[in-house]
Amino acid sequence: MSRARLASQHITRLFLLAALALAGCQSTSALPTEDRVADFAAIKSKAGTVQFTVNRIPIDAARGKPLELAIHETTSTQHDRLFVFIHGVFSDSRMWRYLCWDLQNDYDVMAFDLLGCGASDRPDPADVAADGYGPDALGKDVLVALRKRLAAPDVHPNLRITLVGHSLGAMTILNMWAEPSTHSQFTDILDRVDSIVLLSPPDIASNCRRPIFQEIDGMTDFRMTMADVFGILERRCIEATRTGVTDPSLATKEEADRLVEIFRHASTRHAGQAMLRQAIPRTKERVQQLIAGYANIRIPCLIIWGAQDDLFPTSMAYNLTDRLPSAKLRIVNPAMHGLATERPKICADLLREFVSGDQNVSPKITVLNPTTNSLPQARTDDSHASPTH
């Protein structure tokens, strides 16, 4: 390599470091803690009434190697309804904390850390199969771990299960029924599931690839290290938290800190990047196969969507509602993509209503105002034109 080329690379790196230093010096106002947000503090006050434990469950049956998933669950298993929560990309079980705290006194709750996330094992993407961080593989991990956990003697004999997933987590749930090999392999578990809830699930038939995904996928370890050293990582996570909610007062320090932790560690960052790359099927044939498989989902399904979702438009919500045989749609206005941490109270209320109400008489489509729980707009017609956004 010539001296000129070495000098050019050295100068480029110096310019990069200088730019990072300047950007890192920009001030960003601090976010409030969740204890200072009235709605969140009220939910958090319930957290002390029930204890949670973390169980690590081997999933070697799905992976062919000794790996474990972490399950965060209530220690008391006295209820006959279990909510199983599955998070999305660049996230972990902590995104469900408000819903778990709110629901724990009335139901059993169980929140998974997917492979590569939270307290679960975090294998490098190169050390697992080519699609090892895709929805099919992640869904099978959950089902293997759930099968082992439900075999424990402390499980209620008549336990009914509701699967709840956000974004990629919702895709893993859909694929459990849509992918024939998964459905046939885990019929014993899926037959115990009597309802599913999908928060902001991407419609794979539409364009789900966003510029922000490409930007995140292109982050190298060097760039991330420099961003962390000069404070850019923290600043951008604070800004992402603030712009990720319709009401800036709902952006909390805990959420920003959670993002910083996920992006700071190479293992969780690499897993998230692999999930982004593998989330969407590569061929139209595969997309069509999965969509056709949605017809297998005959159990009640609730779709919850933020009216101002910053990643996926509400047109996807209407499309999915049409494709799923027993789906009901609830659009929360105002709300964005992170419904469970932005509007946890209304999400918890919707879950309660869904599992206890008569789904045959509930409206197919409803728009909700989370500040009053009123229904300013409701649609019950089965034939509708999906709006363009």
Image (cartoon, rainbow, N blue to C red):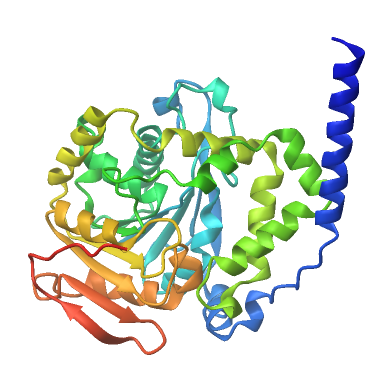
Instruction: Look at the picture and state if 273 lies above or below 282.
Output: below
Between residue 206 and residue 99, name the one nearer to us.
206
Instruction: Look at the picture and state if 333 lies above or below 284.
Output: below
Q: Is residue 194 left or right of residue 162?
A: left
The x, y position of residue 178, in whole percent, is 21, 39
The x, y position of residue 191, in whole percent, is 19, 46
Between residue 65 and residue 231, name the one nearer to us.
231
Q: Is residue 247 left or right of residue 229?
A: left
In the rendered picture of this protein, how many numbered marks are placed on residues? 0
Residue drawn at x 60%, y 82% as measured from the top left: 37
Residue drawn at x 41%, y 77% as measured from the top left: 334
Q: Residue furthest front?
A: 4
Q: Residue furthest top?
A: 1
Residue drawn at x 85%, y 33% as measured from the top left: 13
Instruction: Look at the picture and state if 240 lies above or below 18.
Output: below
Q: Is residue 181 at all visible to an observer of this figure?
A: no
Between residue 43 and residue 338, name the one nearer to us.
338
The x, y position of residue 386, in whole percent, is 19, 62
Residue 119 picture quarter? top right
Q: Is residue 309 at all visible to an observer of this figure?
A: yes
Q: Quadrant of the C terminus?
A: bottom left
The x, y position of residue 234, in whole percent, is 74, 57
Residue drawn at x 30%, y 71% as measured from the top left: 331
Residue 258 picture quarter? bottom right
Q: Quadrant of the N terminus?
A: top right
